[in-house]
Amino acid sequence: MSRPVDERWIRRFRDDDGCATKLLCFPHAGGWSNAYRTWPLGLPPDVGVLAARYPGREDRLGDAFPSGLEALADDIADALGEPARHRLVLFGHSMGASVAHEVALRLQKRGCPPAALCVSGRRPPHALEGLRQHFGTDEEIIADVVRFDESCAPVFADPDLREILLPAIRADYRLVDDYPGGHRPPLDCPVYGYTGDSDTEVNPEQMRRWADTTNGAFRLRVFPGGHFYLRAEEAVLLADMTDVLGGLECRTEAAP
């Protein structure tokens, strides 16, 4: 990248001189960058895999939480510098889809738009009206997390782990609830949508409304599963993304 990346904000799982395309992944609410640690195994070796490191977790436990989702996007866009020498593709799941979209808008405004935006398990900003509010008591937040991911129950049963994890989850839920959404300027890059067919947070028709966020192409893939379909379907998802990234490479090389 033409200006140094702020390493506090970006974790590199694979990023070397042979990576002409860089895939930057954005975690869900309460999620860690480590959720994407296995993705290099399922993607071609010339695709760099990076993940956003949100404050208040992992080795950023002492960093202040952002004041809002848009402020978080500002910080991440600033941390990226000017990624002009590489094809940069953004992928975000759930809350991460909204963050990735806001980052894409900022990069486009600065004249260095991403090559594509991939969004997963989240309504577009202009379709958030009427979405249930997540924020509540700690017990309500924990119940909500466990409803989506039962494997988290033993974690919250451990008082020490609960004390470490809950502040970040609580902060992210507030980001989601306070995010105003609404119409945004259209992106010029293609947008690719992914969702689970039994996700209670978003249905395929709502995901198709991401088509309104771009002047470019839009395509949706629906996989078996709920909100965290991408865990069980990781191999199939990454195979599809390999095709997407390959198509971007061909179009970029063919451009004058």
Image (spheres, helix red, strand yellow):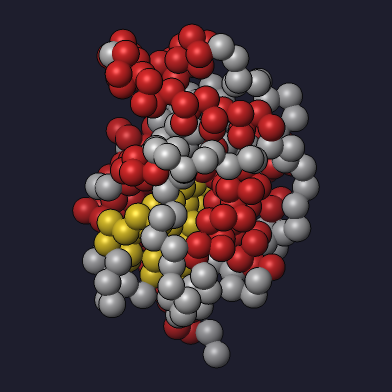
Residue at image x 65%, y 28%? Answer: 177
Residue at image x 28%, y 56%? Answer: 13
- Quadrant including the C terminus: bottom right
Residue at image x 53%, y 84%? Answer: 255
| Residue nearest the observer in this picture, 80 or 195 | 80
Q: Quadrant of residue 250?
A: bottom left
The answer to whether residue 143 is above or below residue 117 is: above
Rendering coords of residue 90 (x, y %): 49, 57
Q: Quadrant of residue 56?
A: top left
Rendering coords of residue 89 (x, y %): 47, 62
Rendering coords of residue 236 (x, y %): 32, 45
Residue at image x 49%, y 73%? Answer: 83
| Residue nearest the observer in this picture, 236 or 163 | 163
Is residue 247 at all visible to an observer of this figure? no
| Residue nearest the observer in this picture, 124 or 167 | 167
- Quadrant including the N terminus: bottom left
The answer to whether residue 175 is above or below residue 133 is: below
